Amino acid sequence: MRVVIIGNGISGIIFSKTLRELDKKVEIDVFAKEKYHYYPRPNLIEFLAGKIPYERIFAFSEDWYREQNINIQLNKPVKKILPDLQEIELQNGKRENYDRLLFTSGSHSFIPPFKGVDKQGVFTLRTIDDAFKILEYLESHQKVVIIGGGVLGLEIARALKSRGAEVEVVEFFDYLLGRQLDFQGASVLKNQIENMGIKVHLGMATEEVLGQNEVKGLQFKGGKELEADMSIIAAGIRANINMVKEAGLETERGLVVNDYLQTSEAAIYGAGDVVQHKGRMYGIIPACFEQARTAAYNILGQKKNYEGTIPSNTLKVFGLSVTSIGLVNPEEGKCEEFRKEIRQEGIYKKIVVQEGTIIGAIWMGTKKGIDHINRAISQRKNIEKWKDSILEDDFDFSLL
């Protein structure tokens, strides 16, 4: 059997690795748009910050691909999928057949439609080439405004600050890390970030990038302006679904898949940022892992259900450990919420309890007990007897 993978991001490579573990003989061909082997995207931040050299960006050596007998075809973008023929067509016109296909083309940076985004000095960060362009421009442009206060925006801010740049962050919503934190936790984080010399502006909508041909500043709704000679947009992602749409596969916001990660075409599967499962798109690394591995089993006929991924993120934001698991912002009145804050130390802990069962947690500024909390949430454990004491420093987590 020949399995073709479109995309060599995390899902494509974890899928290939799993497939090879399960079957030594299956033919595996990966077609990659980029000219680079797979690299974890968090490594781009460390490269941008000057913490790791270029060679250490990549997850596996070229020898590893050869040893695994995974045929990686770099810089070979796919133009279209022909489901009726079970073929793909490359940009150069060449066609390749498949018995099964995994579509894992990922996503692209979303650029809001405000004026001036095409000016010189406006960037996004999604690829190695993006990182190279940012570093080159940074050499002569040190006043940077990051548009977006999510994980990526804050990590870029940290990286460029460590390079000596003057950095400000602008967020459209009224608090940072809207998907991972609540208002109180985000306030603690904002305080820590500003203590490190990065100014944070909340509730500001960008209207225009100022300057003739190059960035000279940003203008916001209400008339406020900020000076800048460089801006990086980190305003979220959108799934790369054009190719599967044109091929007639079912799409909504993403490529629609069932519990086997199978699309509306029986021979085609999907995984990663591009897929939509039961109306939900995740855009997080744990989901990419779980979907890729599940798809590998199913493509080989070893039935395995994907039941969704409990959102779980552990981040290092400005040296501060931030973990967010499950439901952290429940509807008012539906759950109990317990919090503990030590603002000056950047510590904030919160659990969300529904009828005695722990269903969500935020753990910031400390890692103590987080593995136990994570396990308790995934097992939907009843913690009724400990809910008033679990946030205390001396709590015995082995009780969970």
Image (spheres, rainbow, N blue to C red):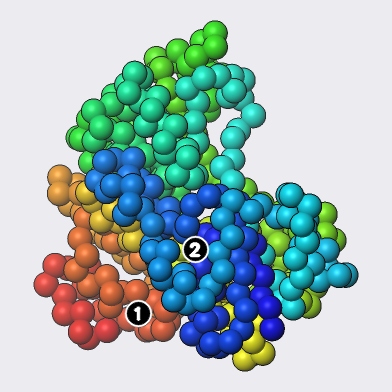
Find residue 339 and report its horizontal and vertical position in percent.
28, 60
Residue at x 44% of width, y 32% of height: 133
Distance between the Cα atoms at labels 1 and 2? 24 Å
Residue at x 64% of width, y 29% of height: 113
Query: Looking at the image, can residue 181 be seen?
Result: no
Q: Is residue 376 left or right of residue 219?
A: left
Q: Quadrant of the C terminus?
A: bottom left
Q: Residues within 10 Å of mark 2 (few under 14, many from 20)?
A: many
Q: Is residue 197 left or right of residue 23?
A: left
Q: Secondary structure at mark 2?
A: helix
Q: Is residue 151 left or right of residue 397?
A: right
* Camera-nearest label, 1 or 2: 2
Residue at x 60% of width, y 33% of height: 112
Q: Which mark is residue 375?
A: 1
Q: Is residue 269 left or right of residue 354?
A: right
Please report whichever mark, 1 or 2, sits nearer to the chain's N-terminal start: 2
Identify whether 363 is placed above or below 75. below
Q: Which residue is nearer to you in this view: 190 or 137? A: 137
Identify whether 322 is placed above or below 30. above
Find residue 197 and report its horizontal and vertical position in percent.
22, 30
**Do the residues bearing badges 1 and 2 touch, measured as CB atoms within 8 Å?**
no
The image quarter containing residue 202 is: top left
Residue under pointer 2: 10
Q: Secondary structure at mark 1?
A: helix
